[in-house]
Amino acid sequence: MSLRNFFCPNSVAIIGAARDEEKVGHAILDNIISSGFKGKIFAINPRADEIHRIKCYPSILNVPGDVDLAIIVIPVQYVLQALDECFRKKVKWAIIISAGFKETGAEGAKKESQLMAKAREYGIRILGPNCMGIIDTECPINATFSHLMPPGGNIGFISQSGALGSSMLDWAKSRKIGLSKFVSLGNKADISENDLFDDWESDENTRVITAYLEGVANGKQFIKISSRVSKKKPIIVVKSGNTDAGARAVSSHTGTLAGSAKAYEAAFKQAGIIRANTIRDLFNYATAFSYQPLPKGKKVAIITNAGGPGIMATDVCEKNNISLSSLSKETLNKLKEFLPEAANFYNPIDVLGDAQADRYRKALEVVIKDNNVNALIVLLTPQGMTQPLETAEAVLEVFNKNDRSIPIVTSFIGGSEVEKAVKFLIENNIPSFDIPEEAVDALRVMMEYTDWQSRLSFPIEKFDVDREKVKKVFGNCRVEDRLELGELEAREILNAYGIRIPKAELASDIGAAKEIAKRIGYPLVLKIVSPNILHKTDVGGVRIGIENEKELEKSYDDIIFNVRKYMPDVYIRGVLIQEFIKDKKETIIGISEDPQFGPMIMFGLGGIYVEALKDVSFRIAPLSRHEASEMIEEVKTVSLLKGTRGEDRSDIESIIEIMLRVSQLIMDFPEIVEMDINPLFVKKQGEGSIAGDARIRIGG
């Protein structure tokens, strides 16, 4: 459903319009009037005849004609009745400013549940409750209790915090950051960021989508909608609540390493969302996207009147894989025609501390025409001969002459000396940042977004697997009232999904163990097998590197003895005699169930890399081949897989395929809540990977 009539209704009724200037109902009515709203305004107040010369009605039912949008600003105990009357009046949209719902606890949550049951029954879409309202600068309408009407622009802003939303409106107005729309989500019982992203995809007035979020309404839908919308418009999000202190306790490696923050990080990457760490970053990025064209490459030219800032910008470029443009011979020759001999003609171009506006203009005119330049950073520090305002005017002049096709970002560093220049730049849509690092950072996200837009869609591959075998294994576990699968069952599942496992057989006694050893061959690994033992090493139930029959006998006896010592009454099915995998690297693939986004896949190197360094990467299932490859590349120790100091390259392609098969497994069987393949042995290139051990837990 389009939100057009929600943001720009033909008629608005304020249920709870107040005469008292200190009340929210008065502020909202006042703001709608002063914003220049052109539609009909109805004030609903049974105790008043008129407010601001607007006639008051005792109920929305007494209003003549249709009402598109109702804004409800009354005590919580009367909200349900007001919604009943809205239904009878055939109102389709409601903004519920009133608080006292789920934000107050269990009783409030019950009221909100009743509210939404009625809203769904009536077909009324609701923003809130417990929100501050909306602003549409194009309509125009300010249907909030904040008197701050931001300047018109093309940035849409969503806030899950009303208080923060008010601060952002103040900041936007003082910094002259133009907004197309502002939405305070409140409790987002109905209308959420997903609805707004979906609607703003086709909103001609919104070029950039920004949001402050504390959580998302529906994780799967969030990824689906954002992935589509972000191909057309940048979505920039500040996400709070990034610690995992409140994460649930889990037993697997993956569950321990994963958490809410990791899930959001993975989801944002897969959906093409630009993550801003601070509100300041959010507005820095948003203004860059709003004001400037996207760069067509990652080559930057820096023009500065001081060496220090130029070096700072260069360092940040290098850290962010942004190349400094190699200027053509023609460009260098033209620069040498007018720049002083002491100037630096090579990138970064230092026009020297005595540079006035004309020298900057000439340098910009030459450099912006170089085909090796995809973006420009203009730095200025106020010195004796500096002309900040005139230089700002020169930047705008060159930008316009070049058909606004090459992005320019600036950092005029200082305070009162550059204040007028900075104001001029911002008013004329040239981003100006306080420090060079911020200018580079803004270009970085623009370049990454350009890559995202040009990125092809990668299919989710399907493999020929034996789903029936897995169903049978899970069915047997449930019959036995077990949610944790034993190793033999985990091996069956991996085998059913085409994941290679070591040769192994179960021995019930030492005689059988010797016969199996002859078939498999030394060296060997021995593991206790019991449905009651999940962490075999904790009870001394594992021995590795068994080289001969004598070691086999001793290790077999030691395992049984250790297990009986720790767990005297435990049921032992036997000892697994397993092939020992040589010449390999150890990695780990894991699954944990995120409550918001569903199954999340982890990859990392095994051993100390996962235990101590937590050198792992995450994505939300299902995975494409490209995403699986990205996960491997993100691990800091990936060079160990690629081969260092003459070592053979590991079979990375086989890791990718196993990750894809695991992805298919958990999508086929959503009852899997935790899974670790640890270790996954990776052989050298062309020899594949082997799942050394696996743990699987299913939901009840």
Image: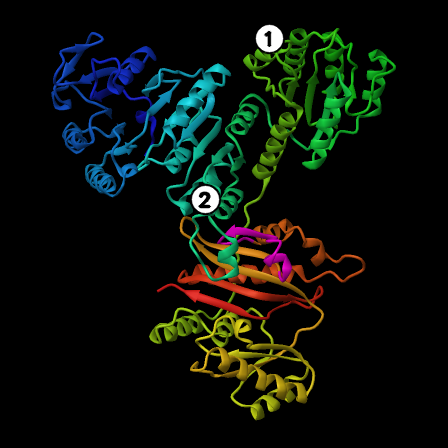
Q: Position of residue 393 (x, y in %)?
A: 64, 9
Say which mark, if any, is on residue 420: 1
In the figure, 486 relative to 64: above or below?
Answer: below
In the image, is residue 663 part of the stretch drawn in magenta? no
What kind of element bears circle 2? Answer: helix
- Outermost right residue: 341
Colour mode of the rendering: rainbow
Ranked by sequence position, the earlier of labels 1 and 2 is 2
- Whether residue 34 is visible to the viewer of this picture, yes or no, is yes
Q: Could you say where residue 58 lies in the image, as x and y percent from the top left?
A: 12, 19
Q: Residue at x 44, y 44 (%)?
A: 224
Q: Nearer the viewer, mark 1 or mark 2?
A: 1
Range covered by the magenta-colored residues: 606-624
Badge 2 density bin: few <14, some 14–19, many ≥20, Cα 10 Å: many
Does residue 14 appear left or right of residue 559 in this picture? left
Residue 462 shows in this picture: no
Q: CA distance from mark 1 to mark 2?
A: 42 Å
Task: Check if residue 608 falls in the magenta segment.
Answer: yes
Mark 2 belongs to which amino acid? Answer: Ile
Q: Which residue corresponds to mark 2? A: 223
Residue positioned most to the front: 565
The quarter of the picture where the N terminus appears is top left
